[in-house]
Image: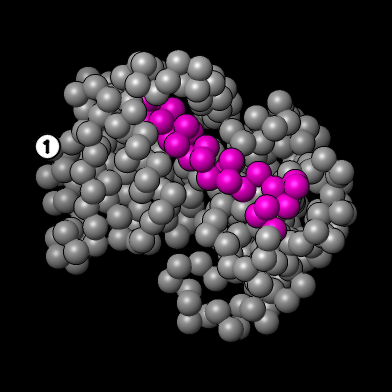
Amino acid sequence: MPTKRDFLSVTDITPDETWSLIQRARNSKSNAKSSGASETAKPLAGKSVALLFDKPSLRTRVSFQVGIQELGGYSVFLGQQEVGLGGREPVSDVAKVLSGYVDCIVARISNHDLLVGLAKYASIPVVNALSDLEHPCQVMADLLTIYEHKDTLAGLSFAYVGDGNNVARSLCLALPAVGMNFTSASPQGYNLDEASVQQAQSRANGASVRVRSLADPKEAVAGADVVYTDVWASMGQESESGVRRNAFDGYTVDAALMQRANADALFMHDMPAHYGEEVPPGMLEHPQSVAFSQAHNRLHAQKTILEFLLSGN
């Protein structure tokens, strides 16, 4: 039996695999539009997937459940009350039990260490649908969106403005590996950790690819092909909201900041948005915004990831 593969981090797949999956996602999306989802191949026929979530979700839950069904599979949703991962039952027991019921576990779990434990004890693939460390499925959808609008990835300059959180980390680790320059701008104390920055630079595809961590958002977006932001206080950080609002004063991505980027730059946000903080009201409808396309592409990117993990190609 072949060794199972997990997708806990964007680094769990090679740069070549990343690029291949993005191309496949674009092609499968195009084919689905032309032929209808009901007529596409069903690579998950006869397979079941457990959705193990300890956080509320809109895009992640719906895109996975719909995607699994479109691929011919069946999903079982398990919330915090049903499982109580690491509390009501040890991670090892949950992993071993689910391995006997389903073919894959998609987990949206606050604590990345619990996710690692699931993957360690499960004999089936485990997919990170969001943890406090990374959000790899989101970033695969982001790359698909950029590729659709720019028709390339290599050589593009990407600017992230905001908190050095899980999304920023996955972006930093993934983008240089496909030849994109990555720059982040965060206030002191909220920037990406140096280990992630160094790892991203080591994965860079091309000697000219740059990975930078700055403080000034205006400097970061200058000459950017893509400008991206995220909430200042993520789920679970609500008690820090006031402190973070003060720390991130001046880091709002608005129309004025977008004018410092290239004229045809894309604006991206993984949503949900906190209007009046990282973006002003209406920014997701800005002429350069692709935020809703980005959200919809979660479906297509994740379908490709599941097919890759469960079919072995």
Residue 171 appears in the picture as rendered: yes
Magenta span dominant secondary structure:
helix
Identify which residue is drawn at 54% across, 21% down. Answer: 30
Q: Give the magenta range.
A: 283-308
Instruction: Tell me: 66 left or right of 150.
Output: left
Name the residue tied to disc 1.
100
Q: Is residue 38 above or below residue 77?
A: above
Q: Position of residue 110 (x, y in %)?
A: 37, 61
Identify which residue is drawn at 71% across, 26% down. Answer: 151
Q: Position of residue 126 (x, y in %)?
A: 31, 40
Identify which amino acid the numbered label 1 is placed on: Gly
Q: Quadrant of the N terminus?
A: top left
Instruction: Tell me: 266 left or right of 202.
Output: right
In front of the other: 149 or 8? 149
**Is 3 covered by the magenta stretch?**
no
Quadrant in which residue 250 is drawn: bottom right
Residue 267 appears in the picture as rendered: no
In front of the other: 207 or 187? 187
The colour scheme applied to this rendered structure is one colour
